[in-house]
Amino acid sequence: MEVTPWEVKGEIDYSKLIKQFGTEAISEELLNEIRRIAGNLHILLKRRFFFSHRDLDKVIEDYKKGKGFFLYTGRGPSGKMHIGHIAPFLLTRWFQEKFGVNVYIQISDDEKFVQKRELSLEEVEVYANDNILDIIAIGFEPSKTFIFKNSEFIGKMYKKALMLGRKITFSSAKAVFGFTNETNISLIHYPALQAVPTFFEKRRCLIPCGIDQDPYWRLQRDHAEALGYYKASAIHSKFLPPLQGVKGKMSSSNPNSAIWLDDSEKAVRMKVMKYAFSGGQPTVEEHRKYGGKPEIDVSFNWLYYLFEEDDKRIKKIEESYRNGDLLTGELKEILIEKINSFLEKHKERKEEAKELVKEFMYEGKLARKMWED
Amino acid sequence: MEVTPWEVKGEIDYSKLIKQFGTEAISEELLNEIRRIAGNLHILLKRRFFFSHRDLDKVIEDYKKGKGFFLYTGRGPSGKMHIGHIAPFLLTRWFQEKFGVNVYIQISDDEKFVQKRELSLEEVEVYANDNILDIIAIGFEPSKTFIFKNSEFIGKMYKKALMLGRKITFSSAKAVFGFTNETNISLIHYPALQAVPTFFEKRRCLIPCGIDQDPYWRLQRDHAEALGYYKASAIHSKFLPPLQGVKGKMSSSNPNSAIWLDDSEKAVRMKVMKYAFSGGQPTVEEHRKYGGKPEIDVSFNWLYYLFEEDDKRIKKIEESYRNGDLLTGELKEILIEKINSFLEKHKERKEEAKELVKEFMYEGKLARKMWED
């Protein structure tokens, strides 16, 4: 397997990643602590889609002591967004709701422009603006959320990026990110930029993100305290499996590997029916006799991690699929209904989001403070 | 010898540098062409302190055709300014006067902060603000000159830096600047920033600068046309020799190697008398008999390149020093008088410059245009 911010390949062994990256598994105890404070647990936490962390325990400690914390997450706008992209945003919104804290959302248009040399600045901006609407549609609190494009907010970030950047040698960036001599100098510098929002407040910063983003926080953690800030805390997710099977990551280069946030009802039905890898048996007779394997069934995985919050219902689905009562087609129908109901609401909220862009980016309480500081 | 933007060591062989860097010597013909247009030649041109160029002939062609051009130069604010720093500014001002064109002056506070890890941001800003006053004191036309600090103007430069930066691999930056694996990632990215002002207008950009800055323009020239801009043109100076002898470059780490723009009359007299390397003979008797060697005499060099504009007078000084009529002490007196008269006026203009900072940086005609664009 290979996991870097720019590539995820092979079958991912998440326990191995925890060891390799030096992060910690999220303990039952820590989850219970969060449940005590929040009143419940978000589906992405209780089903362990977020499975690893750095200093999440310290963040919760700081919260309990009244010191508070803040949230930071982001999006690299190299294309439209799919279902797999929204997990960190859903969890971030949940933390914001339950803990009442500020959220900073970085749109790394600079990174995507320098990483993907086939994209023009204009193309990246079209994606960035569309992604921002999808993110707003998730439902953040406008007065406590600041969404910014790096290319626009650079004036307020540059000095802090240099403070960190001058401490990072090419050797160490190479070791952490797998840069080579052929990597371009703007991409080499980008890690300094991605770390800057962790310095936006003098409190702990909790970052919900895919585990592939962890290298950035490792680098930040090497230097943050020497610069007078806190080491970044993170909570890391798995990758939602692509329709084709429970390996790797959905890919923008294969549109049929994912459900896009703008897919039509018909497209969702077609893709799930046609592509969602099934853990069922080849014939109805065999399925009734031997049952299916939910652990390798993509539809079940999506329901389990993202769409079926009800513990009893997901348990029933699992059991009846395993014992052959529930057929693949029926399981897929459940997922299709869930996805389409989610997307219908999402599209409505995305329409409404157009009116909110200014508030999140420039004129809301937190946004104004950030631009004025 | 070693000549990079960050280090100049050894005895400089300027003809060899022309070959090594692939630039051109400034021909008699080209100088005559400039004289025809300007009415005269600046001392730094006629005495060949500026000795090398890239595409200066094309700049002059464009000017004659009415397409015009613009000027760009800059300063890395890592300390106070000395006599050796002002040559590019003097020539830039002369070109502005004679050709009536816009001037952009980059204060690379970002570069100096990331290059010199012992400096704090605050220290760099103190130097930057002081250097800006020295530069304004040179006498640029306020409505046609824009002075900017990179750390402040980055918002307007960043996208253009990325356009170039994503085309430059670490390999090629390494080859051009001598970067190593231990170079920090912000310094590695800096060359993309230094090239950006060459994209401020869609005309040829002429850059008066020390020959040590040429690597930046080489890199810019490799990619400018593909980005829809002109290849940078440059006119390169020698290094004004340090007081200790006609080798190397004045150094901030040795205050006695240079005359600083804020040196007192007394300090100037002391330094020239005590340190200026003499091409004269050990005793008056020997000097009268054998004469001095102006070519290795630092006082003569400074007069020749910078302070004695009158061709007849400098010729007389040279001859009478060579034949022993003029003694080292007398030669030094001539230089001291020239320097102190220059510094006296400079200090007055620097006082007045305080009132002009806003105009050059934010509110003048060109500055306003740049901030609004």
Image: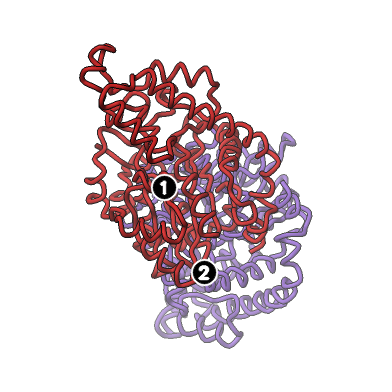
Chain colours: A red, B purple
SS at badge 2: helix
Q: Which mark is residue B121?
A: 2
Badge 2, how many Cα within 10 Å: few under 14, some, many 20+? some
Give me the chain letter of mark 2: B
Report the number of numbered marks: 2
Identify the residue at image location x=49%, y=42%.
A75
SS at badge 1: strand
| A294 w.r.t. A212: above or below | above
Give me the chain letter of mark 1: A
| Mark toward the viewer: 2 or 1 | 1
Residue on which disc 1 sits: A209
Residue contact at pointers 2 and 1, CB within 8 angstroms: no
Identify the residue at image location x=24%, y=37%.
A1
Relative to the observer, which residue lies in front, A346 or A252? Answer: A346
Identify the residue at image location x=50%, y=80%.
B328
Badge 1, how many Cα within 10 Å: few under 14, some, many 20+? many
In the picture, measured across the screen, residue A321 lies left or right of residue B177, that is left
* Dot 1 amino acid type: Cys
* Dot 2 amino acid type: Leu
Identify the residue at image location x=46%, y=85%.
B274
In the picture, measured across the screen, residue A147 lies left or right of residue A214, that is right
Q: Quick one: quadrant of the C terminus of chain A?
A: bottom right
The image shows residue A73 at horizontal and vertical percentages of 48, 50
Relative to the observer, which residue lies in front, B358 or A359? Answer: A359
The image shows residue A4 at horizontal and vertical percentages of 33, 42
The image shows residue B297 at horizontal and vertical percentages of 46, 72
Give the Cα distance between marks 2 and 1.
Answer: 32 Å
| A79 w.r.t. B373: above or below | above
